[in-house]
Amino acid sequence: MTDTSKPVLTGGCQCGAVRFSVTTAPNRVSICHCRMCQKASGAPFASFADINRTDFAWTKGKPSFFRSSTIAERGYCAACGTPLSFGRIDGDRIEIMTGTFDHPDRVIPTRQFGTESRLGWVVGIANLPSQTTQQNYGPEKMATIVSYQHPDHD
């Protein structure tokens, strides 16, 4: 990515030690249900934005990497543990975890992979009873919580 390119999307880890920018829209945004992605994300599935490495840059800090298979490595923040990326070894693209974008609502999945490992209850999530965070904790408790999370901007 050139220094003169204006970012289209930005993001980073929870503590702010690692930040990134993207200069074009992702090639694809997907959800992966495979068991490896479940374990790597600590969640029932992972969601990724597929980006050409030429359109991507780490703008603050650098992630640490775990080689999760013979063909791929996963980036994470060594300071706070946030999972950040998936990439094929020596590949020309990187897949960034959609939850790490400053505006994750702008990266909408259009495809699913690894469905052989999809948990049966995932399809019904939208139908579960739901509450906002404030409804869950109440305004009094919310007023006492101090977040140490990096803000969703540079």
Image (cartoon, rainbow, N blue to C red):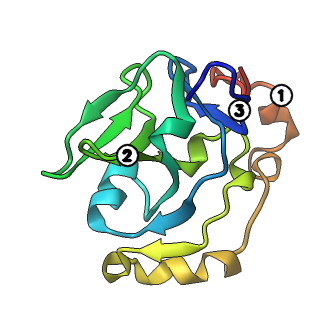
Q: Quadrant of the C terminus?
A: top right
- In the picture, measured across the screen, residue 40 lies left or right of residue 110, that is left
Residue 27 on image: x %, y %? 56, 58
**Residue placed at 41% from the left, 27% from the top?**
77
- Count residues near mark 3 (Cα–Cα under 10 Å), then give few for <14, some for 14-19, many for 20+: some
The quarter holding residue 148 reads: top right
Residue 54 on image: x %, y %? 50, 37
Where does label 1 land, which residue?
A: 143
In front: 137, or 34? 34
Where does label 2 land, which residue?
A: 92
- In the picture, measured across the screen, residue 72 lies left or right of residue 110, that is left
User: Of the residues shown, which amino acid type is indicated by label 3?
Assistant: Pro
Where does label 3 land, which residue?
A: 7
- In the picture, measured across the screen, residue 64 lies left or right of residue 113, that is left
SS type, badge 3 = loop
- Earlier sequence position, callout 2 versus callout 1: 2
User: Of the residues shown, which amino acid type is indicated by label 2?
Assistant: Asp
